[in-house]
Amino acid sequence: MQIPYTDTARPDTGLYNAKLGIWLFLASEVMLFGALFSSYVLLRVGAPTWPHGYEILNIPLATLNTVILISSSVTMVMSWASLMMKDFGKYKRYMGLTILLAFGFLIVKGFEYGAKFSHHLYPSESTFLAIYFTITGLHGLHVIGGIIVNAYLWGPGAKMWKTEPVRFTNRVEVAGLYWHFVDLVWIFLFPVLYLL
Amino acid sequence: MDSTHTDDIKKQVRVYIIVFVALMVLTIVTVTISSLHLSVGAAITVALVVAAIKASLVASYFMHLISEKKVIYATLILTGIFFIALMFLPISHYLDPISVK
């Protein structure tokens, strides 16, 4: 069955279907992360003492990861803009860079987790570490999900550019919307968990 | 027609670069302010305000929300209402007569 409105706007919404689809998905994601933020507030307010994130966590590494993730958002939007300008070579470079930056984020996160584990700081150690590992872990899974989608669009999925360029450009835009959301969540996670 | 379209995208690319620089500056601002170790109330307010500015830059420009269709705005307004309700859930237990003793 042919999926309708992949490269043209649906008359009633004015959008191609995947765009409305991804926004509905992101709305559900807001609630997923919102529930965890809400839990964080509840746990913190209810705790007799709460550590400052900067006493336990590594601020320089988290700042580096913030820079990496924001940069990857820029390269992602540039990959879409490159397709809009019909420059496939540039698209490949920017998308490739986005994927590399995402791996960079995970590697830095891996170092952070590793340092915690080597000091026997596990989620069971304290409520703070439990919520820290839960939220950053879920965020990390989202980064992995983004890498899989972006790698597909960079590799085998890029064949679509030759046959259906508009549809392919839309796919990259949708993947970008997801990726920017992952960046957006981190923008809140960073100060809330590390700096306060 | 097509060259106008490409020019529009080129203009957008310039905006993306400006937003990128703004996000980097705001990241430095967040980290610098946190190193001052303000009181908890002031630190939370400043950190969340800066994060909200950064988030709105990403949403407005990278996610193109500055010029989107109505149905997406409607979806997000509804999401916002539910999100606010979710954030107020932790304090709602104060309204529970059993817990206030």
Image: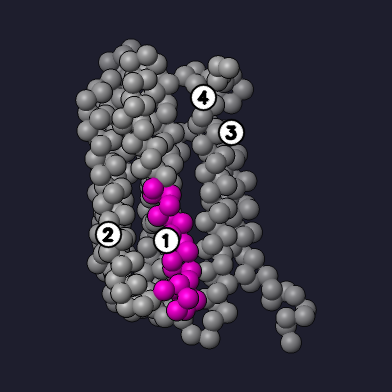
Which residue is under mark 2? A108
Mark 1 or 3, closer to the camera: 1
Secondary element at image label 4: loop
CA separation in Å, label 4 and label 1: 32 Å
Secondary element at image label 1: helix
Percent x, y of residue B4? 30, 18
The mark nearer the N terminus, 4 or 1, is 4
Q: Disc 2 marks which amino acid? A: Val
Please tell me which residue is depicted at 44% across the width and 41% down the height of the picture. A178
- The part of the image, by quadrant, that contains residue B34 is bottom left
Verify whether residue A128 appears in magenta: yes
Mark 3 or 2, closer to the camera: 2
CA separation in Å, label 3 and label 2: 38 Å
Which residue is under mark 3? B71
Q: Disc 3 marks which amino acid? A: Val
CA separation in Å, label 2 and label 1: 12 Å
Q: Which mark is residue A16?
A: 4
Please tell me which residue is depicted at 43% across the width and 49% down the height of the picture. A142
Which residue is under mark 1? A136
> Quick check: do tags 4 and 2 share a chain?
yes
Residue A134 visible in the displayed image = yes
Image quadrant in which the C terminus of chain B is located = bottom right
> Quick check: do tags 4 and 3 share a chain?
no
Image quadrant in which the N terminus of chain B is located = top left
Chain holding disc 4: A
Q: Which range of residues does the magenta coloring cover?
A: A122-144
Q: Disc 4 marks which amino acid? A: Tyr
Please tell me which residue is depicted at 55% across the width and 41% down the height of the picture. A25
Percent x, y of residue A2? 55, 16
